[in-house]
Image: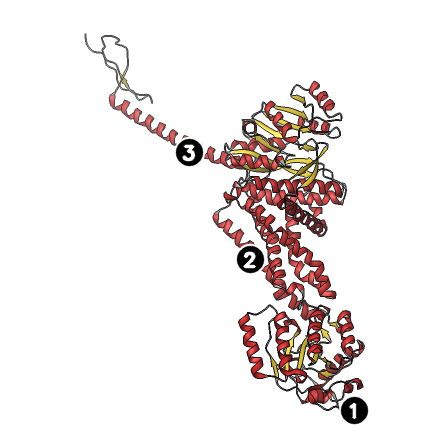
Amino acid sequence: MAKRTSSFVHTGQPQSAWTADKTNSNVPVYFEHEASKQARKLHQSIVKLEKEKRTLLGEMKALEARAMHGWTGMSRRQVYSVVMLGIIVTAIVIFVPPLFIVPFASENLPLTTLDKQTKLVSYLREIQSYSNIFLAVHGYDHKCPIDGSTGYEFTCPTGELSIEEINWRINAGIEIFKKCGLEIDTYAFPGQDYDQRVLSVLSNYYPTPSVYNKTNLIGLGLTGNSSLTDLIIYYGFKEYTWMWRNGVSQEQFQNALNQLKQDKPSLLLVHVQDITNQTLDLLKEYALIQGSAGIIRLDDVTFDSQVEATKKVVDIAMAYNVSLVLAVIPASPYAGTSNSFFSGPMINALWVISTSLFVFPIVVMIPWAFIFKMKKRKPYAKWNPHYPAVSIILPAYNEEKTIAQSIERSLSQRYRGSIEIVIVDDGSTDRTYDIAKTYADKHANIKAIRLEKNQGKSHALNIGFAQAKGEISVFSDTDSSLAPDAISRMISHFKDSEVGMVAGMVVVGNEKNLLTRLQQIEYLLSQTLIRFCQSSQKNVLICPGACTAVRTDIAKKITVTDRTVTEDADFTFSVWKEGWKICQEPEALSYTEAPTGLGSLITQRKRWLYGSLQTIAIHKWAARERNPWVLKAWLECFLSPFVLIFLVSLPLQCFFLGSAFPLFLLTYGLLPFTILAISGAVGIRLFNKGKKSKLAFLMPLYAAYQLMMNLLLVWLVLAFVTKRGIRLPRGGKIIHAI
């Protein structure tokens, strides 16, 4: 039988040929080369699809990671830039006031005249009758009107004063002396620099008659026709103590003493700013050498703050019977801090410490917060199909006024997953449990547990965690109310398997008066700046009891203890110790009832601050982890007594500076207050798209509020260090926290 073959027809399908086959003669068989070609094409398609699959999976993981983290991290360059900015601004705040603002104020503010220095004038009137004390007019303002130099007044290298200007200056200084009721014994030129024109003007002025009854100054015989020009020629002018105001070494002192003994000057010049114990010792040595023939001239006596130093020099003059010329400046452009308490090295050091602790953290955190605000990502919960079951734990003690609202807010959560509410009544003596039981009877997802006696919030939380069935537990205070989207926003962070705990954003819900508004500012600043920056590295130190989410298996493993008066802070550190990351969701809001009275506020803050001290003391291991926020907390506690000394010194400045105190506050407080105002405005603006921006107008009052909180912290640090402890109301009784 002949073989049957088919012709090839191009149909777009694989070509086949019919051949005889013993088993099935009708099975088509592809040509071998066509089969190989199709196999290669299929393999290439598979490889291409696998590659596209890997690419898509990588993109999905990247997208998931971005949404999972919520806030992206800063680069190393950004970190260095922010830290460097903090160092630069802190240095500016520390050094600009004394180096630039004070000199500028001295140049441009109105003069303060001698008659305003009532304490100094009173003392000068008292001693002007002493036979060996001579009052000298020391120019007018001790400053050249042409170039502003304080080294001379009447002869300026950069120009020549007119005879009218010279006459006015001499006359103005003398008139101020007369206004103060002071007798003019002589005239002391600033810098001992003058010319014949000055002497010609001065020759028209005569000393008061009482001068002639005093001991003859430097051996000049005075007559009724003697003018002031006869009293200003000093011989053997020497000064050894210039710039001794900050102290000198024993070697420097000995060298000056040796030179003094060698020179034996007729007149020893010393500036009142340089009066120290070492200077006084040198004056005594001079008085012993010269005796009644010696003359001491004390220059630049100007302010009330210099009375004590002047008295010490007068006492030496009287004790050793040497002549003393007090060169008094009639007018000064600035009632400065010369020889004041603030000019001491200790106060300067306290200024540096206090300013650094205040300025540096703020300047670092503001740009840090802005960077993360700009890098915000959409919450994972908006597209994540996985919604873990959530248990809301509400510990309550005598909360009959707020428990219902707290339960209602928990029921109104806009969360797609299942929610159960566990209410633990910690032995309340009011209707708290009855109200909770009513809700439990109506809702299958609410469980009310009653403890027979009050055992503390920590025990109530442990009971609640033990009863929780959800994968995530959210605990909140019953005097707080969760925003409807609080849980859905916090849950997004748990997509990261390394995150064990998430802090919400607690805000004041009862802005009724000034005190609650100031607390609102404090809440916003501490969370939108400090805690927000902590969250960027997922190492939030304290998750608030008013709004926190935690993995339930963690809460069941780690016991909440009552070893501190702030169980939420202690619990957060314990979770962190187990290696879990802790972050914040700044848009998960919880509205809390803040204290409306000062007494209740102080009681609350005593517990918060003292509990924080207990926490960092118990968890000393945290400091070894080199966490910058823990180190900051330790540093603030360690340096708080120095800050107290600085704050206490402020009223002392009022005593030392007199009328210059307001200017002192202005010049040294301007930059720190400006930074506080900026940080306040930024922190408030970062919250909820600036809906609380009006609170920024209260920043001046908030500065005083924060000062009160700092003083409270210092007192608590001392109570903690001395182990004296504090007494606090807890669960209807008073406890003594050590």
Which of marks 3 and 2 precedes in the sequence? 3
Towards the viewer: 623 or 278: 278
The amino acid type found where label 1 is placed reads: Gly
The amino acid type found where label 2 is placed reads: Ile
* Screen quadrant of the N terminus: top left
Q: Quadrant of residue 671?
A: bottom right
* Screen quadrant of the C terminus: top right
Towards the viewer: 534 or 641: 641
The local crowd at label 3, few if under 14, some if 14 to 19, many if 20 or more residues have their Cα within 10 Å, is: few
Point 39% across, 29% down: residue: 49
- Residue 631 coordinates in the image, percent (x, y): 55, 46
- Residue 227 coordinates in the image, percent (x, y): 75, 89
Say whether marks 3 and 1 touch (CB < 8 Å): no
Q: Which residue is mark 3?
A: 55
What kind of colouring is applied to the model shown?
A: secondary structure
The local crowd at label 2, few if under 14, some if 14 to 19, many if 20 or more residues have their Cα within 10 Å, is: few
Quick one: SS at disc 1?
loop
Residue 688 visible in the picture: no
The local crowd at label 1, few if under 14, some if 14 to 19, many if 20 or more residues have their Cα within 10 Å, is: few
Quick one: SS at disc 3?
helix
Mark 3 against mark 1, which lies toward the viewer?
1
Q: Which residue is mark 2?
A: 88
Q: Quadrant of residue 457?
A: top right
Q: Which residue is mark 1?
A: 224
Cα–Cα span, label 2 and label 1: 64 Å
Residue 718 visible in the picture: yes
Which of marks 1 and 3 precedes in the sequence? 3
Point 59% across, 42% down: residue: 531
Mark 2 against mark 3, which lies toward the viewer?
2
- Residue 446 coordinates in the image, percent (x, y): 66, 22
- Residue 259 coordinates in the image, percent (x, y): 55, 80
**Image position of 588 with respect to 680: above or below:** above
